[in-house]
């Protein structure tokens, strides 16, 4: 589906026509430049590559400089591919107005990294036992993780402590509250993955 690259600015709230206060996320969406058009004949599939945010020339490799020069644009920091675009040209600029007639979108981003977390925070475990009768060091432990005699192993997929967050997350069917083309802003109801300033992909 067609979409754009953007940056998560933060959260705020707006009032609806009924006077209800609605929390929303502000995303700076585009403008994005078409840096490559992929076809079945040359690449084996159809897609449009978009570039977002200006990059310094000294931080751009020589092959990528040639890639951007072919599209007739300056160097970009972020690239992503989207499908479903119709009648776009190389070097064309696509703005947030792409979502003027869109009511719901999907947002793809990298979630916040939480580091190493235990089972209570990572999986919602309730802990083991009570904080009494001499027990003082097992309140947030997972308890037994395997059988005693048969099978004498721990099954794959056992929920345990470990790395949490910092993974690609897709949030579906988020309502579009407002499009502000003069500032390249998109207001989406609720929260989206990622921290302030993180790069997100918004898809119709």
Image (cartoon, helix red, strand yellow):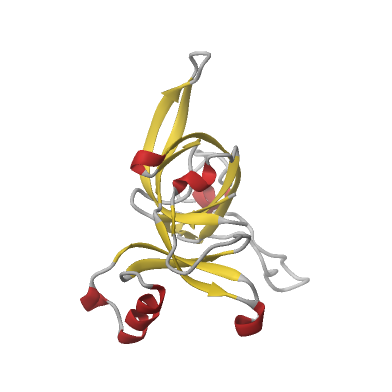
Which is nearer the eye, 69 or 179?
Answer: 69
Residue depicted at x 31% and y 86% = 62
Q: Viewed as shown, does residue 53 lie left or right of 179?
A: left
Left-right relation of 201 to 45: left
Left or right for 137, reference 72: right
* Above or below 97: residue 46: below
User: How far across and how far down the image is residue 29, in percent?
Assistant: 42, 49
Residue 122 visible in the current orientation: yes
Q: Considering depth in this image, is 60 or 94 the residue closer to the camera?
A: 94
Query: Percent position (x, y) of residue 161?
Result: 52, 60
**Residue at coordinates 77% horizontally, 72% vertically from top-left?**
151
Q: Is residue 148 above or below residue 30?
A: below
Q: Is residue 118 visible?
A: no
Query: Is 86 rendered above or below residue 152?
Result: above
Give the residue at the far right of this rendering. 150
Q: Residue furthest top?
A: 18
- Residue 146's x, y, as percent? 68, 64
Q: Residue at x 59, y 49 (%)?
A: 204
Which quarter of the figure is the N terminus placed in?
A: bottom right
What is the x, y in percent for residue 43?
Answer: 60, 82
In this view, the residue in front, 61 or 94, is 94
* Total marks in image: 0
- Say left or right for 158 vs 54: right
């Amino acid at each position: 589906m067609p979409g754009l690259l953007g940056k998560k600015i933060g959260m705020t709230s707006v009032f609806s026509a009924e006077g209800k206060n609605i929390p929303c996320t502000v995303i700076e969406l585009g403008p994005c430049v078409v840096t490559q058009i992929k076809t079945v004949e040359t690449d084996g599939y159809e897609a449009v590559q978009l570039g977002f945010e200006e990059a310094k020339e000294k931080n751009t490799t020589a092959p990528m400089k040639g890639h951007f020069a072919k599209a007739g644009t300056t160097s970009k920091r972020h690239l992503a591919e989207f499908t479903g675009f119709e009648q776009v040209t190389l070097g064309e600029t696509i703005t947030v107005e792409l979502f003027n007639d869109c009511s719901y979108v999907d947002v793809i981003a990298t979630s916040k990294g939480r580091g190493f977390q235990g089972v209570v925070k990572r999986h919602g475990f309730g802990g083991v036992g009570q904080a009494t009768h001499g027990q003082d060091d097992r309140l947030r432990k997972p308890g037994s993780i395997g059988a005693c005699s048969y099978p004498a192993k721990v099954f794959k997929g056992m929920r345990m402590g470990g790395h949490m967050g910092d993974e690609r997350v897709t949030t579906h069917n988020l309502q579009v509250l407002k499009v502000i083309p003069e500032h390249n802003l998109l207001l989406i109801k609720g929260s989206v993955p990622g921290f302030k300033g993180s790069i997100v992909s918004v898809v119709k």
